[in-house]
Image (cartoon, grey):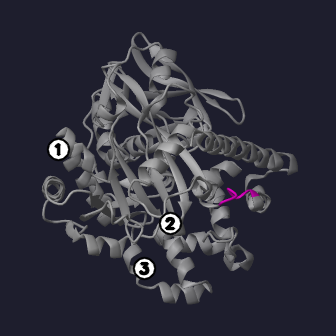
Amino acid sequence: MQDLASTEFDILVIGGGINGVGIALDAASRGLRVALVENSDFAAGTSSKSSKLIHGGLRYLEQYDFKLVREALNERELMVSTLSPHLVKPVSFLYPLQEKFKERTYVGAGMALYDALRGFKRALPWHKHLSQKRISEIAPSLRLDVVTGGFQYFDAQVDDARHTMTIARTAAKYGAVITTRTRCDELIKQGKTIVGAKIKDLESDEVIEVRAKATIMAAGVWTDPLYEKFGLKPGYAVRMSKGAHIVVPGDAIKSESGIIIKTDVSVLFIIPWGDKWVVGTTDTDYNESREEPLASSEDVTYIINQANRVLEPKLRRDQVIGVFAGLRPLVSTDPDSPTTKLSREHVVDSPTRGFVSIAGGKYTTYRVMAQDAVDEAINHLRRIVPESETETLAIIGAEGYSVLMNQIPRLAQEFRIADSTVEHLLNRYGSLMEEVLEPALENSELLESIIPGLPYIGAEIVYAVTHEGARSVDDVMSRRTRIAFEDKNQGLNQVELIANLMAPHLGWNKTQKNASIKEYQLLIEHQNQRLKDAKKSATKAS
């Protein structure tokens, strides 16, 4: 907080989701003095609850949104090849066909356009036509009485929460002051010009004034209430669309590839996630609490029913390990249009001097959105500022990643861990892996697995606190790792162990440690109760 109070910043960013941290990195890399305040934790909202895909949006071709698709495909290629190859990985998808001729021609033309919009220099392979026989070999779970053949194409996937947090750390590396548990309570005005904000430290209750020549709000689904709180009139409205997902074990679906299914209203993804599958998503209007969007019984039923149109054996409700749901902040001018029809384009708004906001867009295009927001904010600085550098600026951990992947056996021997553990660490931390393992040189117990069946080791929990800004058990379980939805017990059996690893680095006493444990237990209890209710409701309905 002292750093916030003692400096006049060029740009103050409100919001620590993917757009906020992207803005902080873009501005800091141009040499601007930047501060970011986040009410909770990095990616605590939508940016940790996406479908975990970095993609062009195949379905947006049907909406003739070629600009968005081309832009997203370009960003996908940059992330896979240059910006974050340790975090963003290629993933293949099957598009099953249910009609032999007309559908293949129509979908094939879309696939060709999807590939062509990227251009000929590309990191991912071109799509392939597949026969019914070949598609059954790749995905034995697809029903041959329904599926006549299909296509295989490539996009990419990411641990969204880890990616967001790593961009925040990269911004800090280039000079940005990055804070969490800090809430913007009020804007400071001189006449009609915004010259900063009053910020409250939610851990100490201290309130300070932060001066900034321009303030950029990247608040996602909190945009409308914050505009109202600040007494400003927005140039757009944000419609909330809920995207729910379920997680099922790897043996529930037999396939070597992800699967995409066209539905009546959108598409459904069956996405490989380690040794599990993430299945989703929904796209429905949402008008409930922004704080804790949860999957409803209708969401779970819809996802399972849509997947079972093409799967055999069918998914069962008792196979669901976990659920999560996020809210898309879609820009809308028509209150009656369905959210599936709303554009995923973003909007930059500047209702008064010194203040800029951004909303809409896709996770994949965060870098372009950040650049546009900073470009607009620069108009309020009244000075010449360099162009954006982020198109070629790799985030921390990317440098040397591919070389280290070639040296997995050597690293495994050096650190006395399994090859699979080295690969796991490289794909989460890249070239920062040795930094993660440093405490284990003195305490070999930190090399041990902490959750049976999952690859996380104790050193990662310590690193989450010492280097990644984790301040609570939930931060570690839900975002620094994904134990909250990857473990069938949501990590509750090991929560004491994990809190004990965190406590000395956060200076917790026993009461503080138990309070953080209890907070996480109550959160999971609430989520599990909703899942039980969903199962009961769906069973009665059937």
**Range of residues picked out in magenta:** 488-492
* Local SS, label 2: helix
Question: Going by the image, does 474 lie left or right of 375?
Answer: right
Q: Quadrant where the N terminus lies?
A: top right
Mark 3, Cα crowd under 10 Å, few <14 / some 14-19 / many 20+, is some
Give the number of marks: 3
Residue occupying image coordinates x 66% and y 60% = 488
Query: Disc 2, disc 3: CB below 8 Å?
Result: no
Q: CA distance from mark 3 to mark 1?
A: 36 Å
Please name the residue shown 38% across and 80% down the image. Answer: 403
Queried whether the magenta region covers residue 190, the answer comes back as no
Could you tell me which quadrant the C terminus lies in? top right
Picture layout, residue 65 above or below residue 507 = above
Identify residue for label 2: 428
Q: Is residue 468 visible?
A: no
Q: Main secondary structure of the magenta part?
A: loop
497 and 153: which is toward the camera: 153
Q: CA distance from mark 1 to mark 2?
A: 32 Å
State which quadrant residue 68 falls in: top left
Q: Nearer the viewer, mark 1 or mark 2?
A: 1
Residue 323 visible within the image: yes
- The residue singled out by tag 3 in the image is 405
Counting residues from the N terminus, which is met first, the one under dot 1 or under dot 2?
Answer: 1
* Amino acid under disc 1: Phe
Tags 1 and 2 touching, CB below 8 Å:
no
Residue for badge 1: 66
Circle 2 crowding by C-alpha within 10 Å: few under 14, some 14–19, many from 20 = many
Q: Amino acid at mark 2?
A: Arg
Kindly state the secondary structure of the residue where label 3 is placed.
helix
Left or right relative to 82: residue 327: right
Q: Secondary structure at mark 1?
A: helix
